[in-house]
Amino acid sequence: MSVLQRVAVPKKGMKAKVEPLRGLPLNSIIEDDCIAAMASLPDACVDMIFADPPYNLQLGGELFRPEGGRVDACDDDWDKFDTFAAYDEFTKAWMKEARRILKPNGTLWVIGSYHNIFRCGATLQDLGFWILNDIVWRKSNPMPNFRGTRFTNAHETLIWASKSEDSRYTFNYRTMKALNDDLQMRSDWVLPICSGGERVKTEGVKAHPTQKPESLLYRVLLACTNKGDVVLDPFFGTGTTGAVARRLGRQWIGIEREKKYVKVARQRIDSTLELDESAMKTMVSKRQQPKVPFGALVETGMIEPGAVLTDSKRRWRAKVGADASVSLADKQGSIHQIGAAAQGAPSCNGWTFWHIEQGERLVCLDDLRQKYIAALG
Amino acid sequence: MSVLQRVAVPKKGMKAKVEPLRGLPLNSIIEDDCIAAMASLPDACVDMIFADPPYNLQLGGELFRPEGGRVDACDDDWDKFDTFAAYDEFTKAWMKEARRILKPNGTLWVIGSYHNIFRCGATLQDLGFWILNDIVWRKSNPMPNFRGTRFTNAHETLIWASKSEDSRYTFNYRTMKALNDDLQMRSDWVLPICSGGERVKTEGVKAHPTQKPESLLYRVLLACTNKGDVVLDPFFGTGTTGAVARRLGRQWIGIEREKKYVKVARQRIDSTLELDESAMKTMVSKRQQPKVPFGALVETGMIEPGAVLTDSKRRWRAKVGADASVSLADKQGSIHQIGAAAQGAPSCNGWTFWHIEQGERLVCLDDLRQKYIAALG
DNA sequence: ACTCGCCTTGAATCAGTCG
DNA sequence: ACGACTGATTCAAGGCGAG
């Protein structure tokens, strides 16, 4: 079943600003098998894919709690595969389609447990995806191991991969750092499992056995997409990806085979509100700030020709020329070159290395640059 | 090269008490390629195998630290494979031998990173091993991501697998629970990397690029072997497995190809003493308070993006962004930074400084943090 | 003996633009 | 495709010397 006609393949290439494709079923759910549904989409049309495929759990009999209750395990039909080979074939099929519809700089996320994640990771590599990180979702409240026969299975694994080795993928480094008390975000994330009011229920029973917490998708989408990006989830379930995408102002496409899940997902997302602009304002990545040549500071008089630059410990003194070149002893060059030469280092960020005396205080060139940028409005 | 003649295959079966095999090179290092060396050992002769195979890192050029230093990468020849297929072939070969020499109730441990662990896990399943857990070693002090291009790679993955699905493997549940303050041991272990006095050095430089911490092997051997059991390590390196095995009264066999590693491993293990009975029983760690980033409260919805923070006397009002950064007037940053900026102070503990309105009452962020920690259980 | 600050280091698939 | 140039980037531990 084709959901929409294939449209012309968009221009590829690093800088091509791809217009939203005509007819792309944005912000809606395709009720179909995920491979068929993806096959109906054009090449290179989505910025990110988040996939939570069947885990291929190999549960023997039923599992009973110590006090006698039955554990409500995941025994749905869609989670059954006869052999590893069958699972691999399925994995390869959906990942191939996923790779095709991904933009050149798009990324894929896959979540799984030890039952399936090794097969997913290997297949991914075989298809040419380039793994960027594996992420451990460490559950703060996992189910205990009732029998006492193994370690408590307290985590799941996510793989983050770009379409190819030379992709220029999106990673909002500053945003992640801000979200983690100004320390780099690590590859292990402590988050609670989905429970309480967040758990989608129909007539009092949980609607889906493996609903993921919104906090997990929140971090994934915030880290690796920009506002307006198109996020596709081929195993949509109760639509956590769609709900969080809407909340964060991303566009989304869901694919889900089971009618009952489609229905609850629609309701859920319809009742989700987008965060308002001011709350959404994420930290500006320094990388996206306008580039300021050092000469601009000299031209505008923030730094006078003839001014003396020094490092934070006043070990070297360099002089600024009228053309914004810098000289130290018999050497002359850019703030970066002379900074590197002074230290005997292969490279140097002159903006953070050099300072200028203002009264008794040393002011870093980078601070002056920030002032300059701020003055631009 | 055959280290010893094959001896008669011992009786298999669940309860067969296999006598220590005549001629098994116990508590010694075989200096040879691991596949050849394992091939020289009889069927079903070891209780556990701990394997730390080459990771197949595919490094580009040199990597420099922000301050200019060079990262001492793992660029040894033994870590180079041309293709994934070549790596798979190698993996399959050593795992096949490993499975043959493993006793029916024996288990295999493999450690790796995202570069190789998915391939190892898939191969393991293909060969009939039965995965019992995947374990995440969360490094308390990992190397940062210097370029800010990805998440800090802060963990490695271990796979624990039995020889087959119906193996009656060893798992010292009580010991693990005791080691974890009387809570079930989870699948994520926080342990520091190997450094300081533990790091084996020859003439001042590290002897091996990838030496594992003894604490890791300690937990593995304590959990999954009994005293007197035979532990084999086919990628022995500096002999961490042997040293910890000796300390814990387990027997060991090491296989290592490189003469220089064999030498340092011998010296190291010779100078290791076995723990006495009483010392082996008194290993209890204290439970420490988890560190909670402010972003966790936002992700989990305890604090909504857009919420207003104020101090105890309501002098300042700051707004929470979707990325958990906080903005006040034209400034934006962490709760600590903005708290400091508001007061004109050099620093500030944002947790105690900021409050949030709940009805008419002001609730301190630190109280919310305590609630969050309590909820983690 | 103790603290404080500085330096070193750890399995790393670690940049983007212009000519 | 390739080279030159510009520019962006770090956390937790341990060791050691100064005070």
Image: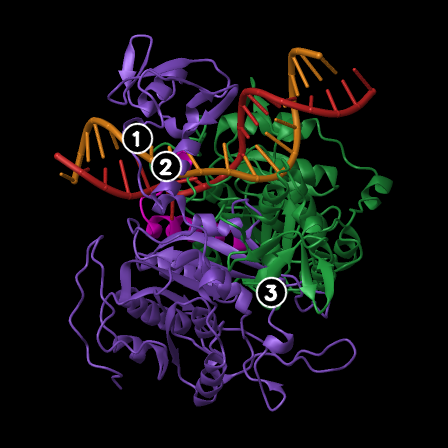
Chain colours: A purple, B green, C red, D orange
Q: To which quarter of the image does residue A119 belong?
A: bottom left
Identity, as a three-letter code, of the amino acid under mark 3: Thr
Subunit ID for the residue under disc 2: A
Q: Tell whether B87 sits left or right of B129.
A: left
Q: Number of callouts in the render?
A: 3
The reply to whether dot 1 and dot 3 touch (C-beta < 8 Å) is no
Q: Main secondary structure of the magenta part?
A: helix
Element assignment for label 1? loop
Tag 1 residue: A300
Residue with the mark numbered 2:
A372
**Residue B4 is drawn in which quadrant?**
top right
Residue B101 sits inside the magenta stretch? yes
Mark 1 or 3, which is nearer the eye?
A: 1
The answer for which chain carries disc 1 is A
Q: Secondary structure at mark 2?
A: helix
Please give the range of residues in magenta. Answer: B75-102
Local SS, label 3: loop
Q: Nearer the viewer, mark 2 or mark 3?
A: 2
Q: Residue furthest top?
A: A330
Relative image position of residue B260 (x, y in whole percent): 51, 25
Q: Is residue A122 visible?
A: yes
Is residue A359 rendered to the left or right of residue B107?
Answer: left
Against B177, residue A183 (above or below) is above
x and y percentages locating residue A179 in the rendered image: 54, 53
Which residue is under mark 3?
B300
Marker disc for residue B72: none
**Marks 2 and 3, how far apart in space?**
38 Å
Residue A66 among magenta residues: no
At label 2, the amino acid type is Tyr
- Same subunit: marks 2 and 3: no
